[in-house]
Image (cartoon, rainbow, N blue to C red):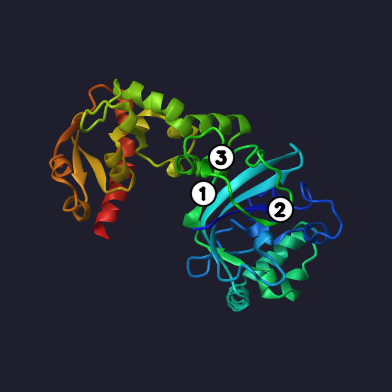
Amino acid sequence: MEEKIARICWNDNDWKKPSGTRGKSQTEGLFEFDNGFGFEEWLFDFETLVDGYKYAFLQPVNTTNHAHAGCRYAIHLYVYDKFKAKNISIAKIASVECLTEKEAKAAYDKLHQSSVIESMVKDVEVVGGNTSPLTTLPPINCFNIRFKPQDVKFISIDDFHSFHELTRYNLYENKHSSKQLFVGFDSEDQLLDDVTEIMNSDVSETERETLMKARVGQGKYRKNVIRVWGNEACAVTLNSVREVLIASHIKAWKDCSDSTERLDGANGILLEATLDKLFDSHLMSLFYKKKNEFEIRFSHSILRKLPKYYKDLAGFTVNIDCMSHDEAARFSSYMEHHNALFQSKCEK
């Protein structure tokens, strides 16, 4: 899929509702200056879905001849932070559909019927903006894209595009490798998977930086997991080839209540890459058998597809004698959470 880079307007409410004029352009004639808001400010308000899709607006897609209508792109989003005088990356949307005028009209009608437009008007009133564009502009000038929330990966890396100047609200072609876009990281996928939830966490900037460093490259968190388990080997196969081992969260990063849970070594298990994927997808789990022993189980749907090497692991036990009493208790609690999701998936 073709990749694009797009700038969005500044927002202090995580792009869930308008936040006023702070941080926005002071250039007369620009929509956000003239009206006190930008349509992109609802970009990540996922309470207003239509048939599983978020209908939204991106100024860079908004051309006079609707040149992008019917196209599908992967789009990297960034914002210009006037306070730091630099571009800041916000998110990547893996699949964005650009709407036709007919599709935009149908979406607008559905959102109007469900009182979403009325709610948006109230949001603009709260920040003292001009509400008339919401009810007078053609629908294509209010909603010109749609995407699924699960395709959004939030990120926050300063100097996202410092290697070349991007200042206008245009849909730029991404001529650079993904690795270049995310300076200092091994791959885009690794980065996106590792920091998806950090932007949504209510933590200080300092703590966010710590969490980023802990998550990316498996830094502090991986060390915590190794310390709790007493070695650096797969808990199931005892494989000690470091390059294929992943410190996998038991209670997923996005489900953790705070940074303590996210960095807790007892909320982790070192697994080979294939087992990590199965565990992370809740197709494999560990169930309490007896004191300090947990039995390996695979979902029936996946078990018959696995090579014999992995099938033979079903029923084996993982021993946690290496953990302290408190660590074992926390590990058991995290596993109960994981088991519930495993069983829920098995029932489907």
Quickly name the residue at label 1.
153
- Element on which disc 3 rests: helix
Determine the residue positioned at 64% across, 37% down.
Answer: 158
Q: Position of residue 180 (x, y in %)?
A: 56, 39
14 horizontally vs 223: left or right: right
136 horizontally vs 290: left or right: right
Q: Which mark is residue 136?
A: none
Quickly name the residue at label 2.
9
- The amino acid type of the residue labelled 2 equals Cys
Determine the residue positioned at 76% across, 70% down.
Answer: 133
- The amino acid type of the residue labelled 3 equals Gln
Q: Is residue 247 above or below residue 151?
A: above
Q: Position of residue 131 (x, y in %)?
A: 77, 67
Q: Answer whether labels 2 and 1 touch (C-beta < 8 Å).
A: no
- Element on which disc 2 rests: loop
Q: Residues within 10 Å of mark 2 (few under 14, many from 20)?
A: many
Q: Which mark is residue 180?
A: 3
Q: Earlier in the sequence, mark 3 or mark 1?
A: 1
257 horizontally vs 273: left or right: right
Q: Earlier in the sequence, mark 3 or mark 2?
A: 2
Q: Quadrant of the C terminus?
A: bottom left
The label nearer to you, 3 versus 1, is 3
Q: Quadrant of residue 219?
A: top left
